[in-house]
């Protein structure tokens, strides 16, 4: 189950890498004003898939049964922290290379697309992978 999730994450990051390489080589980020948006959405989707993989594989104790709203809010907070960290990195690179000066609107847009991709990843995971459905069934039995 988790191996499938890891393979899909690897495929997605390979596609992101290919598109980013093409965008850098052909200057798509400066020529196509909206190209940054789907890239951040795909990045948020990748972060959601890999974060759930790491948490499920290595961090979460197996005896812990969480409610859906607490799981979703925890993951969204993790995605928000990663998105803000990435934006700080992007601004630092932009300042160092002095590529442009409009940060606030671009950064807010990027964070929103990161979170939208992360939310879609969570919806995909909750619908596709049964380890969360099993938790719901187990918690319903325990009540």
Image (cartoon, helix red, strand yellow):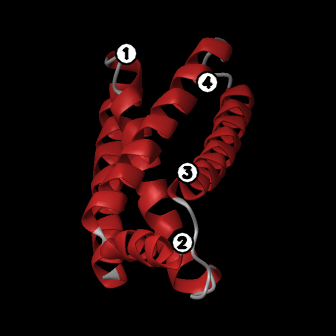
Judged by depth in the image, the label closer to the viewer, 4 or 1, is 4
Question: Dot 1: within a 10 Å radius of its alpha carbon, few (fewer than 14), some, or many (20 or more) residues?
Answer: few
Q: Can you say which quadrant of the picture contains the C terminus?
A: bottom right
Relative to residue 33, is residue 54 depicted above or below? below
Using the image as rendered, state which of residue 100 and residue 15 is in the foreground. 15
User: How far apart are the two marked residues, 2 and 3, measured between alpha carbons?
Assistant: 17 Å
Using the image as rendered, state which of residue 38 and residue 132 is in the foreground. 132
Judged by depth in the image, the label closer to the viewer, 2 or 3, is 2
Judged by depth in the image, the label closer to the viewer, 1 or 3, is 3
Using the image as rendered, state which of residue 103 and residue 133 is in the foreground. 133
Residue 10 seen in the current view: yes
Label 4, on which residue? Answer: 107
Q: Which mark is residue 143?
A: 2
Using the rendered view, name the quadrant where residue 65 is placed: bottom right
Judged by depth in the image, the label closer to the viewer, 2 or 4, is 2
Label 1, on which residue? Answer: 33
Label 3, on which residue? Answer: 69
**Mark positioned earlier in the residue sequence (1 or 3):** 1
Relative to residue 23, is residue 137 depicted above or below? below
| Element assignment for label 3 | helix
Q: Is residue 85 left or right of residue 112?
A: right
Q: Are marks 2 and 1 in contact (CB under 8 Å)?
A: no
């Amino acid at each position: 189950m988790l191996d499938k999730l890891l393979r899909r994450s690897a495929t997605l990051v390979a596609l992101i890498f290919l598109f980013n390489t093409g965008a850098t080589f052909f200057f798509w980020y400066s020529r196509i004003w909206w190209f940054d948006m789907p890239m951040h959405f795909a990045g948020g989707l990748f972060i959601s898939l890999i974060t759930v993989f790491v948490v499920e594989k290595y961090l979460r104790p197996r005896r812990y049964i969480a409610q859906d709203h607490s799981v979703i809010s925890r993951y969204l907070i993790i995605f928000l922290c990663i998105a803000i960290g990435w934006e700080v990195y992007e601004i630092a690179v932009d300042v160092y290379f002095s590529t442009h000066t409009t940060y606030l609107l671009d950064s807010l847009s990027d964070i929103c697309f990161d979170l939208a991709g992360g939310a879609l990843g969570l919806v995909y995971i909750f619908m596709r992978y049964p380890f969360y459905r099993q938790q719901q069934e187990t918690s319903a039995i325990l009540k």
